[in-house]
Image (cartoon, grey):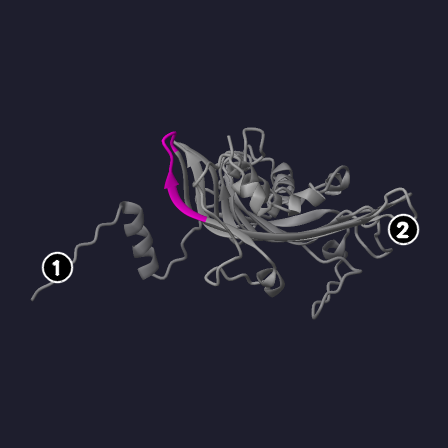
């Protein structure tokens, strides 16, 4: 038996291969940054990450379930053993889920399944010195879609969870919020035309934020935007940042510059990484940065494109203070943590 293998390459491939055979260094072609506002692009990536939370998935699911009709979908009390949760406490809690493959005459359809559970406690009075305390957590897991005709109302493929704790009293406010995503979330009920990311996203992102008495943001993970493009160019972001605001800051904290790095990816899969070097007052580990240019608290980072430092661009400086000028994240309310079997099985419109 004979095998005939044919391979075709263009002139660029031929020249690159020939150069490699000769041991010559090949020039790495870098994309142009003309017309790109890097400061605005990186700041937008952080702002979008603060909206990429479990709340978008949860509220979109609740809204989509308003379309339910008798027998479509079938809903159940108690999560089956086949749907396992990573959080054992939530796995043991009473849960709900729908599972169906149904289509009605009007074109409404439910396919797959979504399981969820939530717990919330609300105690006290805001007008007293001890205040009102809210504590809630919820989780949703699924591989399901809801829609009508050609319109996709909601899709969840993966797992999302979040938790909120807040205290409000006379002259005092304190809240913390965390969200953990490993899911694709899409649909018009989760992202309308006014949404910052109308096409939804695929995200593996952890967010922790606090406010009231301590302004603080921590972001770890990455997100791909289904339709939205930052600066009409970047379809993904990767963030490993902690940002300290003025409230609750210590004497050694740098309020101008975050700790960590952030990346943007364009549609050609080229990464543009912005690295913020540690400040003098931070934990440096085994590193010893004695050069003041490296430890300056100036809000500026070093840009790398395809792994190469862009010396001709210099430092990229971003003002992160506006992240704390309003509501850092949209906090869920107490009623947002509870979606009962009665809510689901009551006949919709």
Q: Which residue is mark 1?
A: 4
N-terminal of the pair, mark 1 or mark 2, is 1
Along the horizontal axis of the image, is 187 left or right of 342? left
Instruction: Give the structural element (helix, strand or loop) at label 1.
Output: loop
Give the foreground label among 1 and 2: 2
Along the horizontal axis of the image, is 154 left or right of 93? left
- Could you tell me residue 47's position as x and y percent? 65, 41
Position of residue 48 relative to residue 282, above or below, is above
Q: Which residue is mark 2?
A: 130
Q: Is residue 53 visible?
A: no
111 and 38: which one is in front? 111
- Could you tell me residue 60's position as x and y percent? 55, 39
Q: Is residue 75 visible?
A: yes
338 and 7: which one is in front? 338
Residue that appears at 91% across and 45% down:
128
Q: Which mark is residue 222?
A: none
Residue 52 part of the magenta segment: no
Residue 104 part of the magenta segment: yes
The residue stretch that appears in magenta: 99-107
Residue that appears at 69% across and 56% down:
277
């Amino acid at each position: 038996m004979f095998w005939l293998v044919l391979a075709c390459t263009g002139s660029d491939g031929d020249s690159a291969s020939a150069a490699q055979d000769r041991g010559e260094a090949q020039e790495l072609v870098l994309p142009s940054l003309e017309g790109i506002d890097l400061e605005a692009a990186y700041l937008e990536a952080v702002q979008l990450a603060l909206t990429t939370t479990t709340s978008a998935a949860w509220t979109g699911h609740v809204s989509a379930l308003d379309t339910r009709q008798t027998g479509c979908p079938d809903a159940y009390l108690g999560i089956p053993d086949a749907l396992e949760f990573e959080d054992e406490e939530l796995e043991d809690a009473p849960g709900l889920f729908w599972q169906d493959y149904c289509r009605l005459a009007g074109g409404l359809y439910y396919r797959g399944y979504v399981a969820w559970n939530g717990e919330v406690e609300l105690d006290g009075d805001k007008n007293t010195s001890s205040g009102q305390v809210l504590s809630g957590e919820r989780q949703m897991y699924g591989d399901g879609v809801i829609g009508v005709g050609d319109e996709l109302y909601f899709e969840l493929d993966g797992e999302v969870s979040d938790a909120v704790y807040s205290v409000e009293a006379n002259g005092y406010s304190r809240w913390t919020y965390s969200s953990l995503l490993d899911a694709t979330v899409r649909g018009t009920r989760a992202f309308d035309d006014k949404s910052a990311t109308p096409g939804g996203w695929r995200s593996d992102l952890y967010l922790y934020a606090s406010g009231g008495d301590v302004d603080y943001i921590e972001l770890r993970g990455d997100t791909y935007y289904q339709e939205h493009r930052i600066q009409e160019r970047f379809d993904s972001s990767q963030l490993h940042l902690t940002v300290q605001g003025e409230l609750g800051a210590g004497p050694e904290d740098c309020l101008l510059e975050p700790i960590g790095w952030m990346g943007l990816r364009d549609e050609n899969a080229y990464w543009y990484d912005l690295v913020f070097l540690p400040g003098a007052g931070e934990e440096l580990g085994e590193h010893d940065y004695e050069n003041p240019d490296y430890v300056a608290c100036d809000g500026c980072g070093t840009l790398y494109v395809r792994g190469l430092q862009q010396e001709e661009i210099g430092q990229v400086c971003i003002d992160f203070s506006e992240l704390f000028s309003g509501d850092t994240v949209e906090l869920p309310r107490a009623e947002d943590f509870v979606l009962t079997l009665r809510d689901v099985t009551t006949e919709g419109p």
